[in-house]
Image (tube, rainbow, N blue to C red):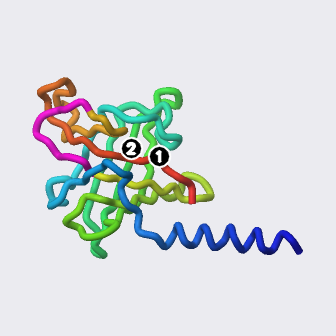
Amino acid sequence: MRILPIITAIAVSFLSVACSTPRPPPGVTVVSPFDVQRYLGTWYEIARFDHPFESGLEKVTIAWHPRVDGGLDVVNKGYNPDRGMWQKTDGVAYFTGEPSRAALKISFFGLSTAAITSLLWIRSIVTRWSAARSRLSLAPGPGADHRPGGQAADAGHCHPTGL
């Protein structure tokens, strides 16, 4: 019977985390006001940490498309040279607060028995490339200049967590 209080405590912990509104870590300021129209379409990852669902992939893109319910459809795609094929993962993103603030919660499905959920805080959308102090840098096209002086966007991205 000593296990019941432990299971209850774990369940309450999961529920409190699931019901809370995610916030950027201390020191991270997100773009506000944010115009999602500038961010729609396909973006090309030019720098990132190798997340498990993108491990070993090349030419990784993230496509953002509006949903009727106010969220965004997210399509991650990349080429797997070991398997000689393209791999794709579909997800959905919702603003964690007002859509005028660039803070989103993204969930990817079909990766395993659990969904992969991560948080994205867009730190800046710039017309010129900058050394990203964050974990993800995006360019608006494959021909974008990835060196200082080229075009890119800087995003703060936390490691995904399986929920």
Viewer-closest of 35 and 80: 35
Residue visible at 43% across and 35% down? 49
Residue 141 placement (x, y as % from top left): 19, 38
Residue visible at 46% across and 27% down? 81
Nearer the observer: mark 2 or 1; the answer is: 1
Numbered range of the magenta stretch: 122-131
Residue labelled with disc 1:
159
Q: Is 67 left or right of 141, judged from the image as shown?
A: right
Asked which quadrant contains residue 163, the reply is bottom right
Is 50 above or below relative to 114?
Answer: above
Residue 144 placement (x, y as % from top left): 17, 32
Residue labelled with disc 2:
77
Viewer-closest of 77 and 34: 34
Instruction: Give the secondary structure at mark 1.
Output: loop
Viewer-closest of 16 and 126: 16
Residue 160 placement (x, y as % from top left): 49, 49
Query: How many residues crowd mark 1 within 10 Å: few (<14), some (14–19), many (20+)?
Result: some
Rounded to the nearest whole Å, what is the CA distance between mark 2 and mark 1?
18 Å
Residue visible at 42% across and 47% down? 158
Viewer-closest of 10 and 151: 10
Instruction: Give the secondary structure at mark 2.
Output: strand
**Which residue appears farthest toward the right when viewing the image?**
1
**Disc 2 residue type?**
Lys
**Disc 1 residue type?**
His
Q: Is 47 left or right of 49, judged from the image as shown?
A: left
**Which residue appears farthest toward the front when viewing the image?**
26
